[in-house]
Amino acid sequence: MSATPKIALVTRLSDDAETNWLNLLRAALPAEHIESLRRMRPEDHAGVEIAIVANPDPTDLRKLPNILWVHSLWAGVERLVAELPDFNRPVVRLIDPQLSRNMSEAALAWTYYLFRDMPAYARQQRAREWCQQPYRSAASVTVGVLGLGELGAASAERIRAQDFNVLGWSRSQKDLPGIISLSGKDGLAELLSHSDIVLCLLPLTEATRGLLDERAFAAMKPGAALINFARGPIVATDALVSSLDAGRLSHAVLDVFDQEPLPPESGLWSHPGITVLPHISAPTDPRTGAQVVAANIRAFRENGRLPESVDFATGY
């Protein structure tokens, strides 16, 4: 009889995607017995000590009565927090340096896209117009980064390294070299009013849901642009479209939406002021992600130490 699994992989991924994670985790943790919950015998559920999860079905986690803690394979945990409001085990989210690099690459790429007027040139191509837009230097452009956690800080620093002026805003005051850090309502208003490009990298919480609404867009610098790489519900979509239609904002790059995939009938697909991306700004790399999870589990086995866990009250 095979040993009882001590670690369960609990996901809503496809079979192929889950198998890929399972193989990588087993290779990174050869001393552990890891099994997909889908393939476990019910009599083995009580022996599971750790759950590694990716948007798990809450009913699946409830099958594991003796788990000590949970490790998420994603950096964002708002869905897990929302679906498990009474969960009383520590939940550790994925903090992978590679994920921060991936996000900072995308943040810089799409900042350049807006900075060098790519939406205007795309419109001109469709209209067969040959017109050179005026050049502006990076040093004359201010990028405001909403959210200065691991992903936001890495993105702010990478953008700052390319000579842009960078403002940052977060719930609590941060100290990042070369970046003006703001907080609170007054700090948010200051960032919005001075930024040519606003990059949203906030976690989705009750405090940030609908934060970028009609009032926020009215406070933004006339002609400013928005990049949302955080979560769709942080932006009030109708207010954004109204601001674009009125010419208060020049363009929006959206990688996240209230409903994903974005429905084919959504008007956002064809809006001339919106670039639609299919949630690709910072994909998790299973190879590096598995190594991060493995290191955290090894540390726990050696000394009982866990990385900082999610605060369910704040949502991250």
Image (spheres, helix red, strand yellow):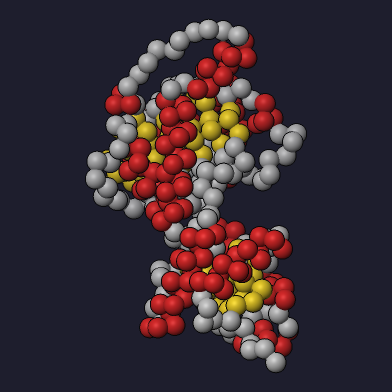
Using the rendered image of the protein, determine whether residue 37 is visible from the camera's viewpoint: yes
- Quick check: 8 above or below 292? below
Between residue 52 and residue 89, name the one nearer to us.
52
Q: Judge left or right: residue 59 versus residue 131.
A: right
Which of the 4 image quadrants contains residue 144?
top left
Which of the 4 image quadrants contains residue 189?
top left
User: Which residue is located at x 30 percent, y 38 percent?
Assistant: 161
Which residue is farthest left? 177
Between residue 44 and residue 223, name the one nearer to us.
44
User: Which residue is located at x 58 percent, y 30 percent?
Assistant: 275
User: Which residue is located at x 72 percent, y 63 percent?
Assistant: 15
Q: Quadrant of the N terminus?
A: bottom right
Which of the 4 image quadrants contains residue 167?
top left
In percent of width and height, residue 157 lies at 32, 43
In percent of width and height, residue 316 lies at 47, 60
Which residue is farthest right? 265
- Quick check: 279 above or below 286? above
Q: Judge left or right: residue 82 versus residue 309.
A: right
Q: Judge left or right: residue 127 versus residue 207.
A: right
User: Which residue is located at x 44 percent, y 72 percent?
Assistant: 296
In percent of width and height, residue 92 lies at 48, 68
Using the rendered image of the protein, determine whether residue 81 is visible from the camera's viewpoint: no
- Quick check: 80 above or below 268? below
In percent of width and height, residue 210 lies at 54, 43
Q: How many marks?
A: 0
